[in-house]
Image (cartoon, rainbow, N blue to C red):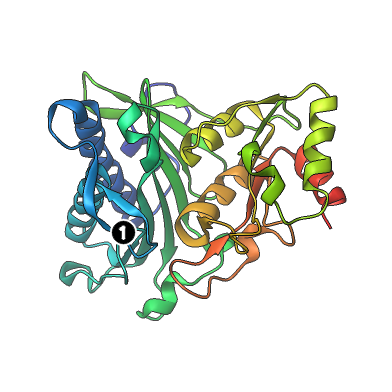
Amino acid sequence: MSTLGVNLSHFLLKNDVEPALISAIESISNACKIIASKVRVAGLADILGKAGKTNVQGEEVQKLDELANDILVEYLSESKVFYGLASEELDEPIFPEKGKEGEFVVSFDPLDGSSNIDVNVSIGTIFSIHRRVNGTVEDFLQEGYKQVAAGYVIYGPSTMLILSVGNGVVGFTLDPDTGMFLLSHPEIKMPEKGKIYSINEANAEKWDREGLREFIQTLKQEGYTLRYIGSMVADVHRTLIKGGIFAYPSDKKNKNGKLRLLYEAAPMAFLIEQAGGLATNGNENLLKVKPENIHQRTPVYLGSQKEIKQLLELLR
């Protein structure tokens, strides 16, 4: 069931994933293959830079953001398994005509790490799948622990799909020769402690949680190394593989944090906990927080057991 090199579809079949969910995951993976191909030639295809508009978050939209969103909307709408789609780049969810009988709703950040696009740093796509409950926008506003699948695709030196369907975390690498995602990481388990902390320490004077600066200072005294890329996908991917902690706290300017709960924090929290780590907003488990709106923001702390428990002891 975990043979290296098995393709994504066969892996899901062998692990008794329901057919509709397999179709859902395949539609996302197929869209991300197209996005990966666009990312590889972005500098040659005039799709770098700003698109000249802002999204619902008030952020400047990059051309690749817009392109990735369009690709995902097209592929997921055509799949027939998604009743609704919510995206960072869309003001409101959309309900595809072909998805009227769809069993799931999906939320996604089409291209995380937009600020790094133009400098060729790893970026990615994050997604979260919930089961359709009553066929309204409320279906998106479910707690993270109710996700039936979550994952991300990272466009780096290789393109990787990291996935959980609720029974652990696995990783697939895109084989450019076959065009298939092949199993490369059959069982991703986080170390109980790491050696790296990942946070934008330039904002330390703005942090509004007592104890956070003390926690970071303690990590330094214990010999931890700072690594911060600025693409959530890349920073969390390293944390997932090597352990430690990734943090994007609230501050005096952003009282509710900056990362979005529904399609950034919750799917990453799901993966981290499925791999044996912990996820919190500083007050409660991120997977227990019920979103109040599609684009709700939250503080985020993800990491190994040791670091998160130590953090929670110091936060006040």
User: Would you say 249 lies left or right of 146 here?
Assistant: right
Q: Residue at x 36, y 60 (%)?
A: 106
Q: Which of 260/270 is in front?
A: 260
Q: Amino acid at mark 1?
A: Glu
Assess disc 1: are there few (<14), some (14-19) or many (≥20) residues with their C-alpha within 10 Å of its C-alpha: many
Position of residue 153 relative to residue 270, above or below, is above
Place of residue 1 in the rendered image (x, y in percent of width and height, measured from the top left)? 47, 32
Q: Residue at x 36, y 22 (%)?
A: 158
Q: Residue at x 47, y 73 (%)?
A: 293
Place of residue 266 in the rendered image (x, y in percent of width and height, measured from the top left)? 54, 56
Does dot 1 land on a helix, a strand or a loop? Answer: loop
- On the image, which quarter does residue 146 sit in? bottom right
Q: Is residue 74 visible?
A: yes
Q: Which of 249/148 is in front?
A: 249
User: Would you say 74 lies left or right of 59 here?
Assistant: left
Give the residue pinned by disc 1: 89
Q: Residue at x 69, y 32 (%)?
A: 244
